[in-house]
Amino acid sequence: MISKKIQKALIEQLNKEFYSAYLYLSMSAHCHKIDLNGAANWFMIQYQEEVDHGTKIYNYLIDQDVDVELEEIAKPPKEFGTLIETFKASLAHEQRMTAYLNDLSDLALKEKDHATYNLLQWFVTEQVEEEATVSEIISKLKIVGNDGYGLLMIDNELSTRVPTNIPLTTTGA
Ligand code: FEO
């Protein structure tokens, strides 16, 4: 059984993961609106990954016999500007998520809760990959600048993203 403090912190993180999903769904809608359907696909898959992240925490709480009480999910923004501005907003969001996960890992260690710490390390590793991927897309968008053809090439590349199988079990297996 995990402590009440850890339970509360994990339920807050679960909420942040579902907010992330909502945020990316809104970014996907925004990309459809500006006729960049490849980017809309990319954000839709990101939305699905965030749902899986939230579900992974949920499954862990259930495994730990926690009586889960879900909170409201905040409304995400609707306007994100150009594609590079949208990806910059995504990177800033992921950097905040990394900070939350680091704080949560610190708390798990302080509480000597190694099972939760182990779960969180999966998330910490995932954050490194997410930040790197988004940074790479931003770099490419900087290279093409205002070149419409280059932007369409990147949009085409983003259209090829397919869902990855995120392990939803708590062991990461
Ligand atoms: Fe689940 Fe992108 O943080």
Image: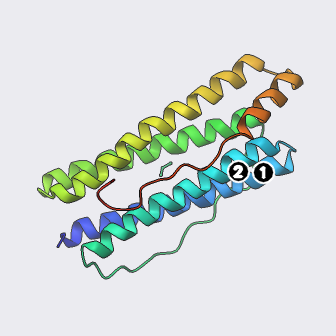
Residue 2 shown left or right of residue 95 in the figure: left
Mark 2 and mark 1: span between their CA atoms? 5 Å
The N terminus: image quadrant: bottom left
- Residue 136's spot in the image, x, y percent? 59, 26
Q: In the picture, residue 156 is in which quadrant? A: top right
* Mark seen at residue 30: 1
Q: The residue under label 1 is which amino acid type?
A: His
Callout 2: helix, strand or loop?
A: helix
For image coordinates 71% across by 39% down, the residue present is 160
* Mark seen at residue 27: 2
For image coordinates 77% across by 42% down, the residue present is 38
The C terminus: image quadrant: bottom left
Query: From this viewpoint, which residue is outermost toward the top?
Result: 143
Looking at the image, do the residues carrying marks 2 and 1 touch, with CB atoms under 8 Å apart?
Answer: yes
Name above or below for residue 155 compared with residue 20. Answer: above
Q: Is mark 1 within 8 Å of ligand 1?
A: no
